[in-house]
Amino acid sequence: MFEVGQIRGGYGPINILNGISFRIDDGDAVAVLGPNGAGKSTLMAALTGTLPRCSGTLFMGARDLSRSPSHELVSAGIALVPEGRQVFAPFTVRDNLRLGAIKLSARGRLSERFEYVFGLFPRLAERASQVAGTMSGGEQQMLAIGRALMSKPSLLLLDEPFLGLAPAIVEEIIVSLTRLKADGLTMILVEQKLDIASRCAARAFVMQKGRFVYEGSFSELISRDDLREMYFGSAKAGEVPSI
């Protein structure tokens, strides 16, 4: 169980997050939706300790992580796939993945994690010795997800992993995330497109101005006139636009 209580934080004197609270059970997958500037990426940064939290609580099960720095959050089982991939371009695929396993410790052997990631993304196995900077954007996104999985997380945060990717690559990554969900990995996905999010997650959170304004099923979200207008413009109730 992952539980967040009244998280507030921002950049310097500017407060972006205005009391975010939610709970995710083990094995659950949720999507965080919202317009640009709603605070979605700021929330991901606050949950991973890369942005200082002004106040609020953070619990992984019974473990209080409210004041833990980012490296302790990784050790506790939280891993982030950042927006924009941020792979180490001069390093090989294998070296990028190995960097993700620095905090692996007792959670599994390195060889087992390589086997798991290569099984999830066979392309990475084929390109294990290739320099990451020479790969396509879609392959780099697979590498960013694989790098996060090398730490054997119990909670995976994905910040817009489909941004700018070709439809064929989107489908390939959705299949991989579906497998992760079936394996029982808890996930929080930040996504702009509701049709993609609904295929990867069981529930939706909608953010606006640093707050959650909706939490529930995708079907109910689509039926909400106010939120439907935000995302679909003139789409009718019950309609979900395609990619």
Image: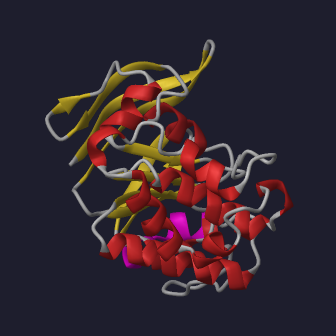
Tell whether 44 sits left or right of 170. left
Image quarter hosting the C terminus:
bottom right
**Quadrant in the rendering for residue 73:** top left
Give coordinates of residue 81: x percent, y percent.
Answer: 56, 51
Give coordinates of residue 228: x percent, y percent.
Answer: 55, 71
Q: Which residue is situated farthest in the top direction here?
A: 13
Residue at x-position 58% and y-position 62%: 191
Which residue is at the front of the view, 144 or 181?
144
156 relative to 52, above or below: below
* Magenta stretch contains residue 55: no
Find the magenta span and give its range: 219-230
**Quadrant in the rendering for residue 113:** bottom left
* Magenta stretch contains residue 220: yes
Which residue is at the front of the view, 131 or 39?
131
Colour setting:
secondary structure
Give coordinates of residue 101: x percent, y percent.
Answer: 47, 44
Which residue is at the front of the view, 170 or 179?
179
Residue at x-position 46% and y-position 27%: 70
**Quadrant in the rendering for residue 105:** top left
Residue at x-position 31% and y-position 51%: 108
Question: Could one spot residue 161 in this view of the protein?
Answer: no
Question: Could one spot residue 21 in this view of the protein?
Answer: yes
102 relative to 94, above or below: above
Give coordinates of residue 134: x percent, y percent.
Answer: 86, 61
53 relative to 119, above or below: above
Magenta stretch: dominant secondary structure? helix
Residue at x-position 55% and y-position 53%: 147
Q: Which residue is situated farthest in the left direction here?
A: 62
Tell whether 94 sits left or right of 148. right
Tell whether 2 sits left or right of 207. left
Q: Which residue is situated farthest in the right direction here?
A: 134
